[in-house]
Amino acid sequence: MHRPIQFILTCFLCAVSSVSGKANYAPERFDLEHLPLPLSARWSFPFQPDWRRTDVTIYYRPPSERPLDVWDWGHIFIYVRDDQTGQAAYFDYYPENGYSVLGQVDQARIDAHASLTIETDAEQEQSILAGIREMQQRLPDWKLKVVMALFGRSSTCVSRSQELLKRGRIIVKGTGPRGVWENVWRQYSDEFLTWKQNQISAAKSGKRAEKYRPGSGFAEPEPGREYGRDPQHQSRRANPQALNNLPMFFKDGQRVK
């Protein structure tokens, strides 16, 4: 009983669409943007995370403002996660009691630093993770001499983090933590990227370009705040499953405890 009715309705709808000159689902040219999606796809798409996206986060603490801490130039460390494999690692490198240390990063450590997340791809992440795994096997002694730092021959949180980031085709300049932060800011901060997008839109409409003026996070970032683009919301939460979830102590390149 239902099949004849369905057939009649189908013929009626086809006739109406042909009279109007256009069929609802037959665009004049093949355009992916106008193809109708199934109801399930239209409902589920906005809520699906993009697991192809992976990220690198740079954490920064400015130099101490206390007069006696003349050798405190601030600090940086990095976090890498590959969402395809689930592997993640911190690289938090500093000296302690004559040792070179890869430190344990907990929530308190993260809360004490500002962060800037860079959107990357899986290949970049895997290259940086491979470098961190190598450092866990043999870590160069931490050394800081002003003259050596100026010529790029020091071994500090800055120089080793720069080496790791370079493996992932992320080129970051600066001889100290502040210089690294300012350089990263002018490439990857959400503020700068938004300004850049606005300038492209302005140029297309014939408007005059505006000079970029960094906000307060450039010179005085707030601890506990994210300044990059972090679609996975990873930067402000400690990851206890990271590869180096315990402190590692090295001397003469070898792990001693």
Image (cartoon, rainbow, N blue to C red):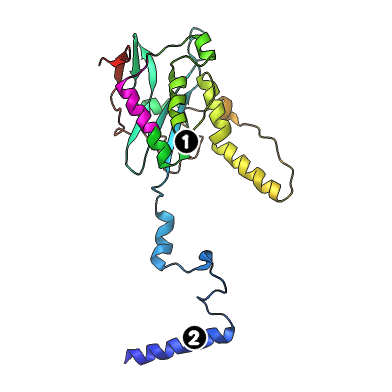
Relative vertical location of residue 137 with respect to residue 26 in this rendering, above or below: above
In percent of the image, x 43 and y 86: which residue is there? Answer: 10
In percent of the image, x 43 and y 16: which residue is there? Answer: 155
**Residue 158 percent coordinates (x, y):** 47, 21
Q: Secondary structure at mark 1?
A: strand
* Residue 137 magenta-highlighted: yes
**Residue 129 percent coordinates (x, y):** 36, 32
What is the span of residues highlighted in magenta in the rendered image? 128-140
In percent of the image, x 45 and y 25: which residue is there? Answer: 163
Occupied quadrant, residue 236: top left
Residue type at the position of mark 1: Thr
Mark 1 Cα shell of 10 Å, populated few (<14), some (14-19), many (≥20) = many
Residue toward you, 227 or 14? 14
**Residue 156 percent coordinates (x, y):** 44, 17
Mark 2 Cα shell of 10 Å, populated few (<14), some (14-19), many (≥20) = few
Q: Quadrant of the N terminus?
A: bottom left
Q: Can residue 104 be spotted in the picture?
A: no
Q: Which mark is residue 117?
A: 1
Mark 2 or mark 1, which is nearer the start of the sequence? Answer: 2
Please give the residue where the numbered disc 2 appears in the rendered image: 14
